[in-house]
Amino acid sequence: MRVERNNSLDTLKALSITFVFIWHLRPFQFIIDDSSQIHVLMIAKIIRDLELQLSLTAVPIFYIVSLYLFFKKFNDIKYLRKRLTKLIKIYLFWMIVQNIFFVIFTREFPSFSWQMFIGLEPSLPFVGDSVFYFLFNLICLISFAFLYQLINSNYLKKVLSFTIIMFCLFYFETCFLLNFSIPYHWLINFVIYVPIAFYLANFTNKILNFKFYYLIAYLLFSFHDIYLRNYGYYLNIYGRIAIVSGAVAIFCYVYNQKDIKQNLIIQQLSKYSLGLFSLHKYWQYLFFLLINHYRVGIDGRVFGTPLSSIFIIEGFFVIFFTCVSVYLLKLTFFKQFVS
């Protein structure tokens, strides 16, 4: 089944990669000290809350879009084989790149572990874990989506969907209230999006009719998260009801905009979101390596304001060189690994 290019899906992917950049680069950081005025503290808190409640919907939105397209396009085992083969090839390529980069810049050899196998390691100094757990999880989710698709009984599918969704939501909230951390790379954070994407793909209008309620749930649970975080509760990265409802609400509202016009920037961000996602942390690492080598302080201010200048410069640096890298790679054989 051929699915025509959808501008709303392109917009969702472009929005997601933008959120990823905001979350990882955090360009708007304030220098806070004892003399900071109350309005500066309030602005800094609002920005941080938006990062935690909005930017973190990026990965779930990516998964919803990918699974939605899988359910729309799936027709036989050949499509599954083609999809998984491509994903595995991309995953292996970037894991090789990650390991080579790690060896070159740390002069150490990574030890093989389960964390490496799932794409979380080797971690780089300054910027932390590898981002390629995303690809490993996507391979698992597509495989599960295939098994889910094989269920012929609509009743059984409804029961399974209801069970998965309710269990995940209950698990997320229970862990939150008990202050139990759910590692952000665990697959349990994302299994819920398989039944969600299935119903979005097969009962689109029915699901879109409830978009306002998803938005209300997102707002209410976001305030719930912010309130508990102020009292010392640990905020799980992806295992939160607010993140699930937020990702679904954003998908529904953007997808429902059928009059979205073609936009070159959005199309390019969408088309090369894989390359942007895969490469940006390398440039972020190189930026911090430079400022660490030259002992550049991070307390520089923008025109005398409490806004830190170094993170804004980092944002421009990383975005510019990541885009240049993607542009150069798309001219070569490696285009298949960035688009």
Image: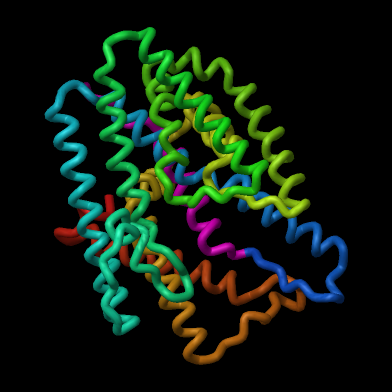
Residue furthest toward the left?
A: 78
Q: Residue at x 55, y 90 (%)?
A: 295
Q: Position of residue 73 (x, y in %)?
A: 25, 25
Q: Quadrant of the N terminus?
A: top left
Q: Quadrant of residue 335?
A: bottom left
Magenta span main SS: helix
Pick whichever, 85 or 164, lies toward us. 164
Asked whether 17 falls inside the magenta stretch, the response is: yes
Q: Residue at x 24, y 58 (%)?
A: 330
121, above or below 180, in the image? below
Q: Using residue 230 as the reference point, say whether residue 339 is left or right of it.
A: left
Q: Quadrant of residue 109?
A: bottom left
132, above or below 76, in the image? below
Per the rendered image, the range of residues in magenta is 1-27
Q: Using residue 141 as the reference point, say whether residue 335 is left or right of it.
A: left
Q: Residue at x 58, y 18 (%)?
A: 210
95, above or below 301, in the image? above
Q: Residue at x 79, y 75 (%)?
A: 33
280, above or below 209, in the image? below
Q: Position of residue 165 (x, y in %)?
A: 49, 26
